[in-house]
Amino acid sequence: MTDSGDRTDDLRRALSESASEPERLGRVLADESITDLDLRHALRGRLPATVAAFVMEHSRFGVRQTVLGAVARSPSTAPRIALQALPGLAWRDLAEVAVAAELAPAVRQKAEALLLEGLNAMRLGDLITLSRIGPRRVTSHLLLSSDPRVREAGLLNPRLRDGDLCGVLESAEPPREISAEILRVHRWAASYQVRRAIVFSLATPHPISLPLIPGMNPADLKELARSDDVPPLVSAVARRILG
C-alpha cells in the first residue's frame, strides 16, 4: 500500500473512532498536516454521518470545494448536509452526485438542477465532457446545443434511453442535424422507437426521413398517411406505400 493510502486509512480510522466525540473530532481535523485531498479521500469511505456534519459546520474544511464534493458524494452523509454542500461544488462533482443511485433522490435532483442552471457559464470542453457523462436530463438538454461536438458526445452517453432521444426530436426546435447524427450511432439506428421519432419530427430533412418510412409498421404508416403534423411529402410517401 502506498504512503498516501496509509494516510487515508489512518485518517478515516481516526475520524470514525472520534465520530461520537465532538472535541476529539475537532482535534483530529485541526491537524495542519491534513490536506483537502487527504480529507476528500477519507470521506469517500463510509463514515458515521456525524463526521460529514462536523466537517461542514465546525471545521476549516467546510468551505473547501474539494472536500465539499466528497461530503455530498458520500452515501453516509445525511441528505440535509449533502444539500448544503451542493451549491459549492464544481460541475464534475455535481455530475457525479447527480448519477449516484445510492444517494437520496432529493440530493441527486438538486445536483442536476444546479448543473442545468450553470450550463451557460461552462466552457465548451467541459460541456462536451458533461454531455458524455452527465445525467440523462442534462444530456438531453445538451443535445439541443448548437455545437455538434456537444451533441455527438451526448449521443454516446450510456445513460441515455430511447425515450430521451424521442423527447429531443419532439421538442420545439431540435437541431436539423440531430437526426443524421443519431443515425450514425448504431445503438440508436437500431431502435425502432427512435427511427419512428425521426420520421415524425418536423425538423428532420427529407433525405433522412424518407428512406426510413418503408420500415415503419402498418399502424405508423397509417398515422403518417393521415397526419397533418408531418411534412406533406412524408404523408404522401406513406400513402403510396399503403397503396
Image: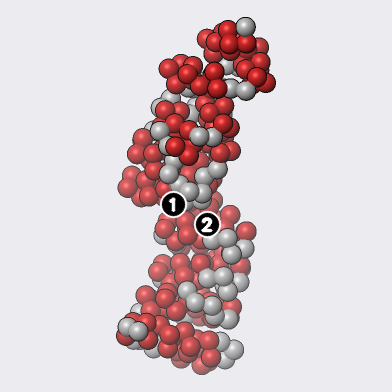
Left or right, 6 with reference to 143: left
- Judging by the rendered image, the residue that carries numbered circle 2 is 99
**Label ID, residue 203:** none
Q: How many marks?
A: 2
Residue 211's spot in the image, x, y percent? 47, 18
Are circles 1 and 2 on residues that touch, CB within 8 Å?
yes
Q: Which mark is residue 133?
A: 1
Residue at horizontal 49 percent and vertical 77 percent from the top = 45
Residue at 50% over, 34% down: 190
Q: Amino acid at mark 2?
A: Val
Q: Is residue 55 left or right of residue 6?
A: right
Classed neighbour count for the residue bearing mark 1: other residues with Cα under 10 Å, few (<14), some (14–19), many (≥20): many
Q: Disc 1 on helix, strand or loop?
A: helix
Q: Is residue 157 above or below residue 30?
A: above
* Residue 179 coordinates in the image, percent (x, y): 45, 28
Dot 2: what SS?
loop
Name which quarter of the figure residue 61 lies in.
bottom left
Left or right of residue 53, residue 94 in this image: left
Residue 26 visible, this orientation: no
Q: Nearer the viewer, residue 139 or 19?
A: 139
In percent of width and height, residue 14 lies at 48, 90
Q: Residue at x 54, y 80 (%)?
A: 47
Of marks 1 and 2, which one's residue comes earlier in the chain? Answer: 2
Cα–Cα gap, marks 1 and 2: 9 Å
Residue 162's spot in the image, x, y percent? Answer: 56, 39
Query: Considering only vertical position in the picture, is 221 above or below 45?
Result: above
Q: Quadrant of residue 84?
A: bottom right
Residue 218 picture quarter:
top right
- Residue 50 vertical position relative to residue 107 in the rendered view, above or below: below
- Picture residue at 42% right of the left edge, 48% below the top: 132
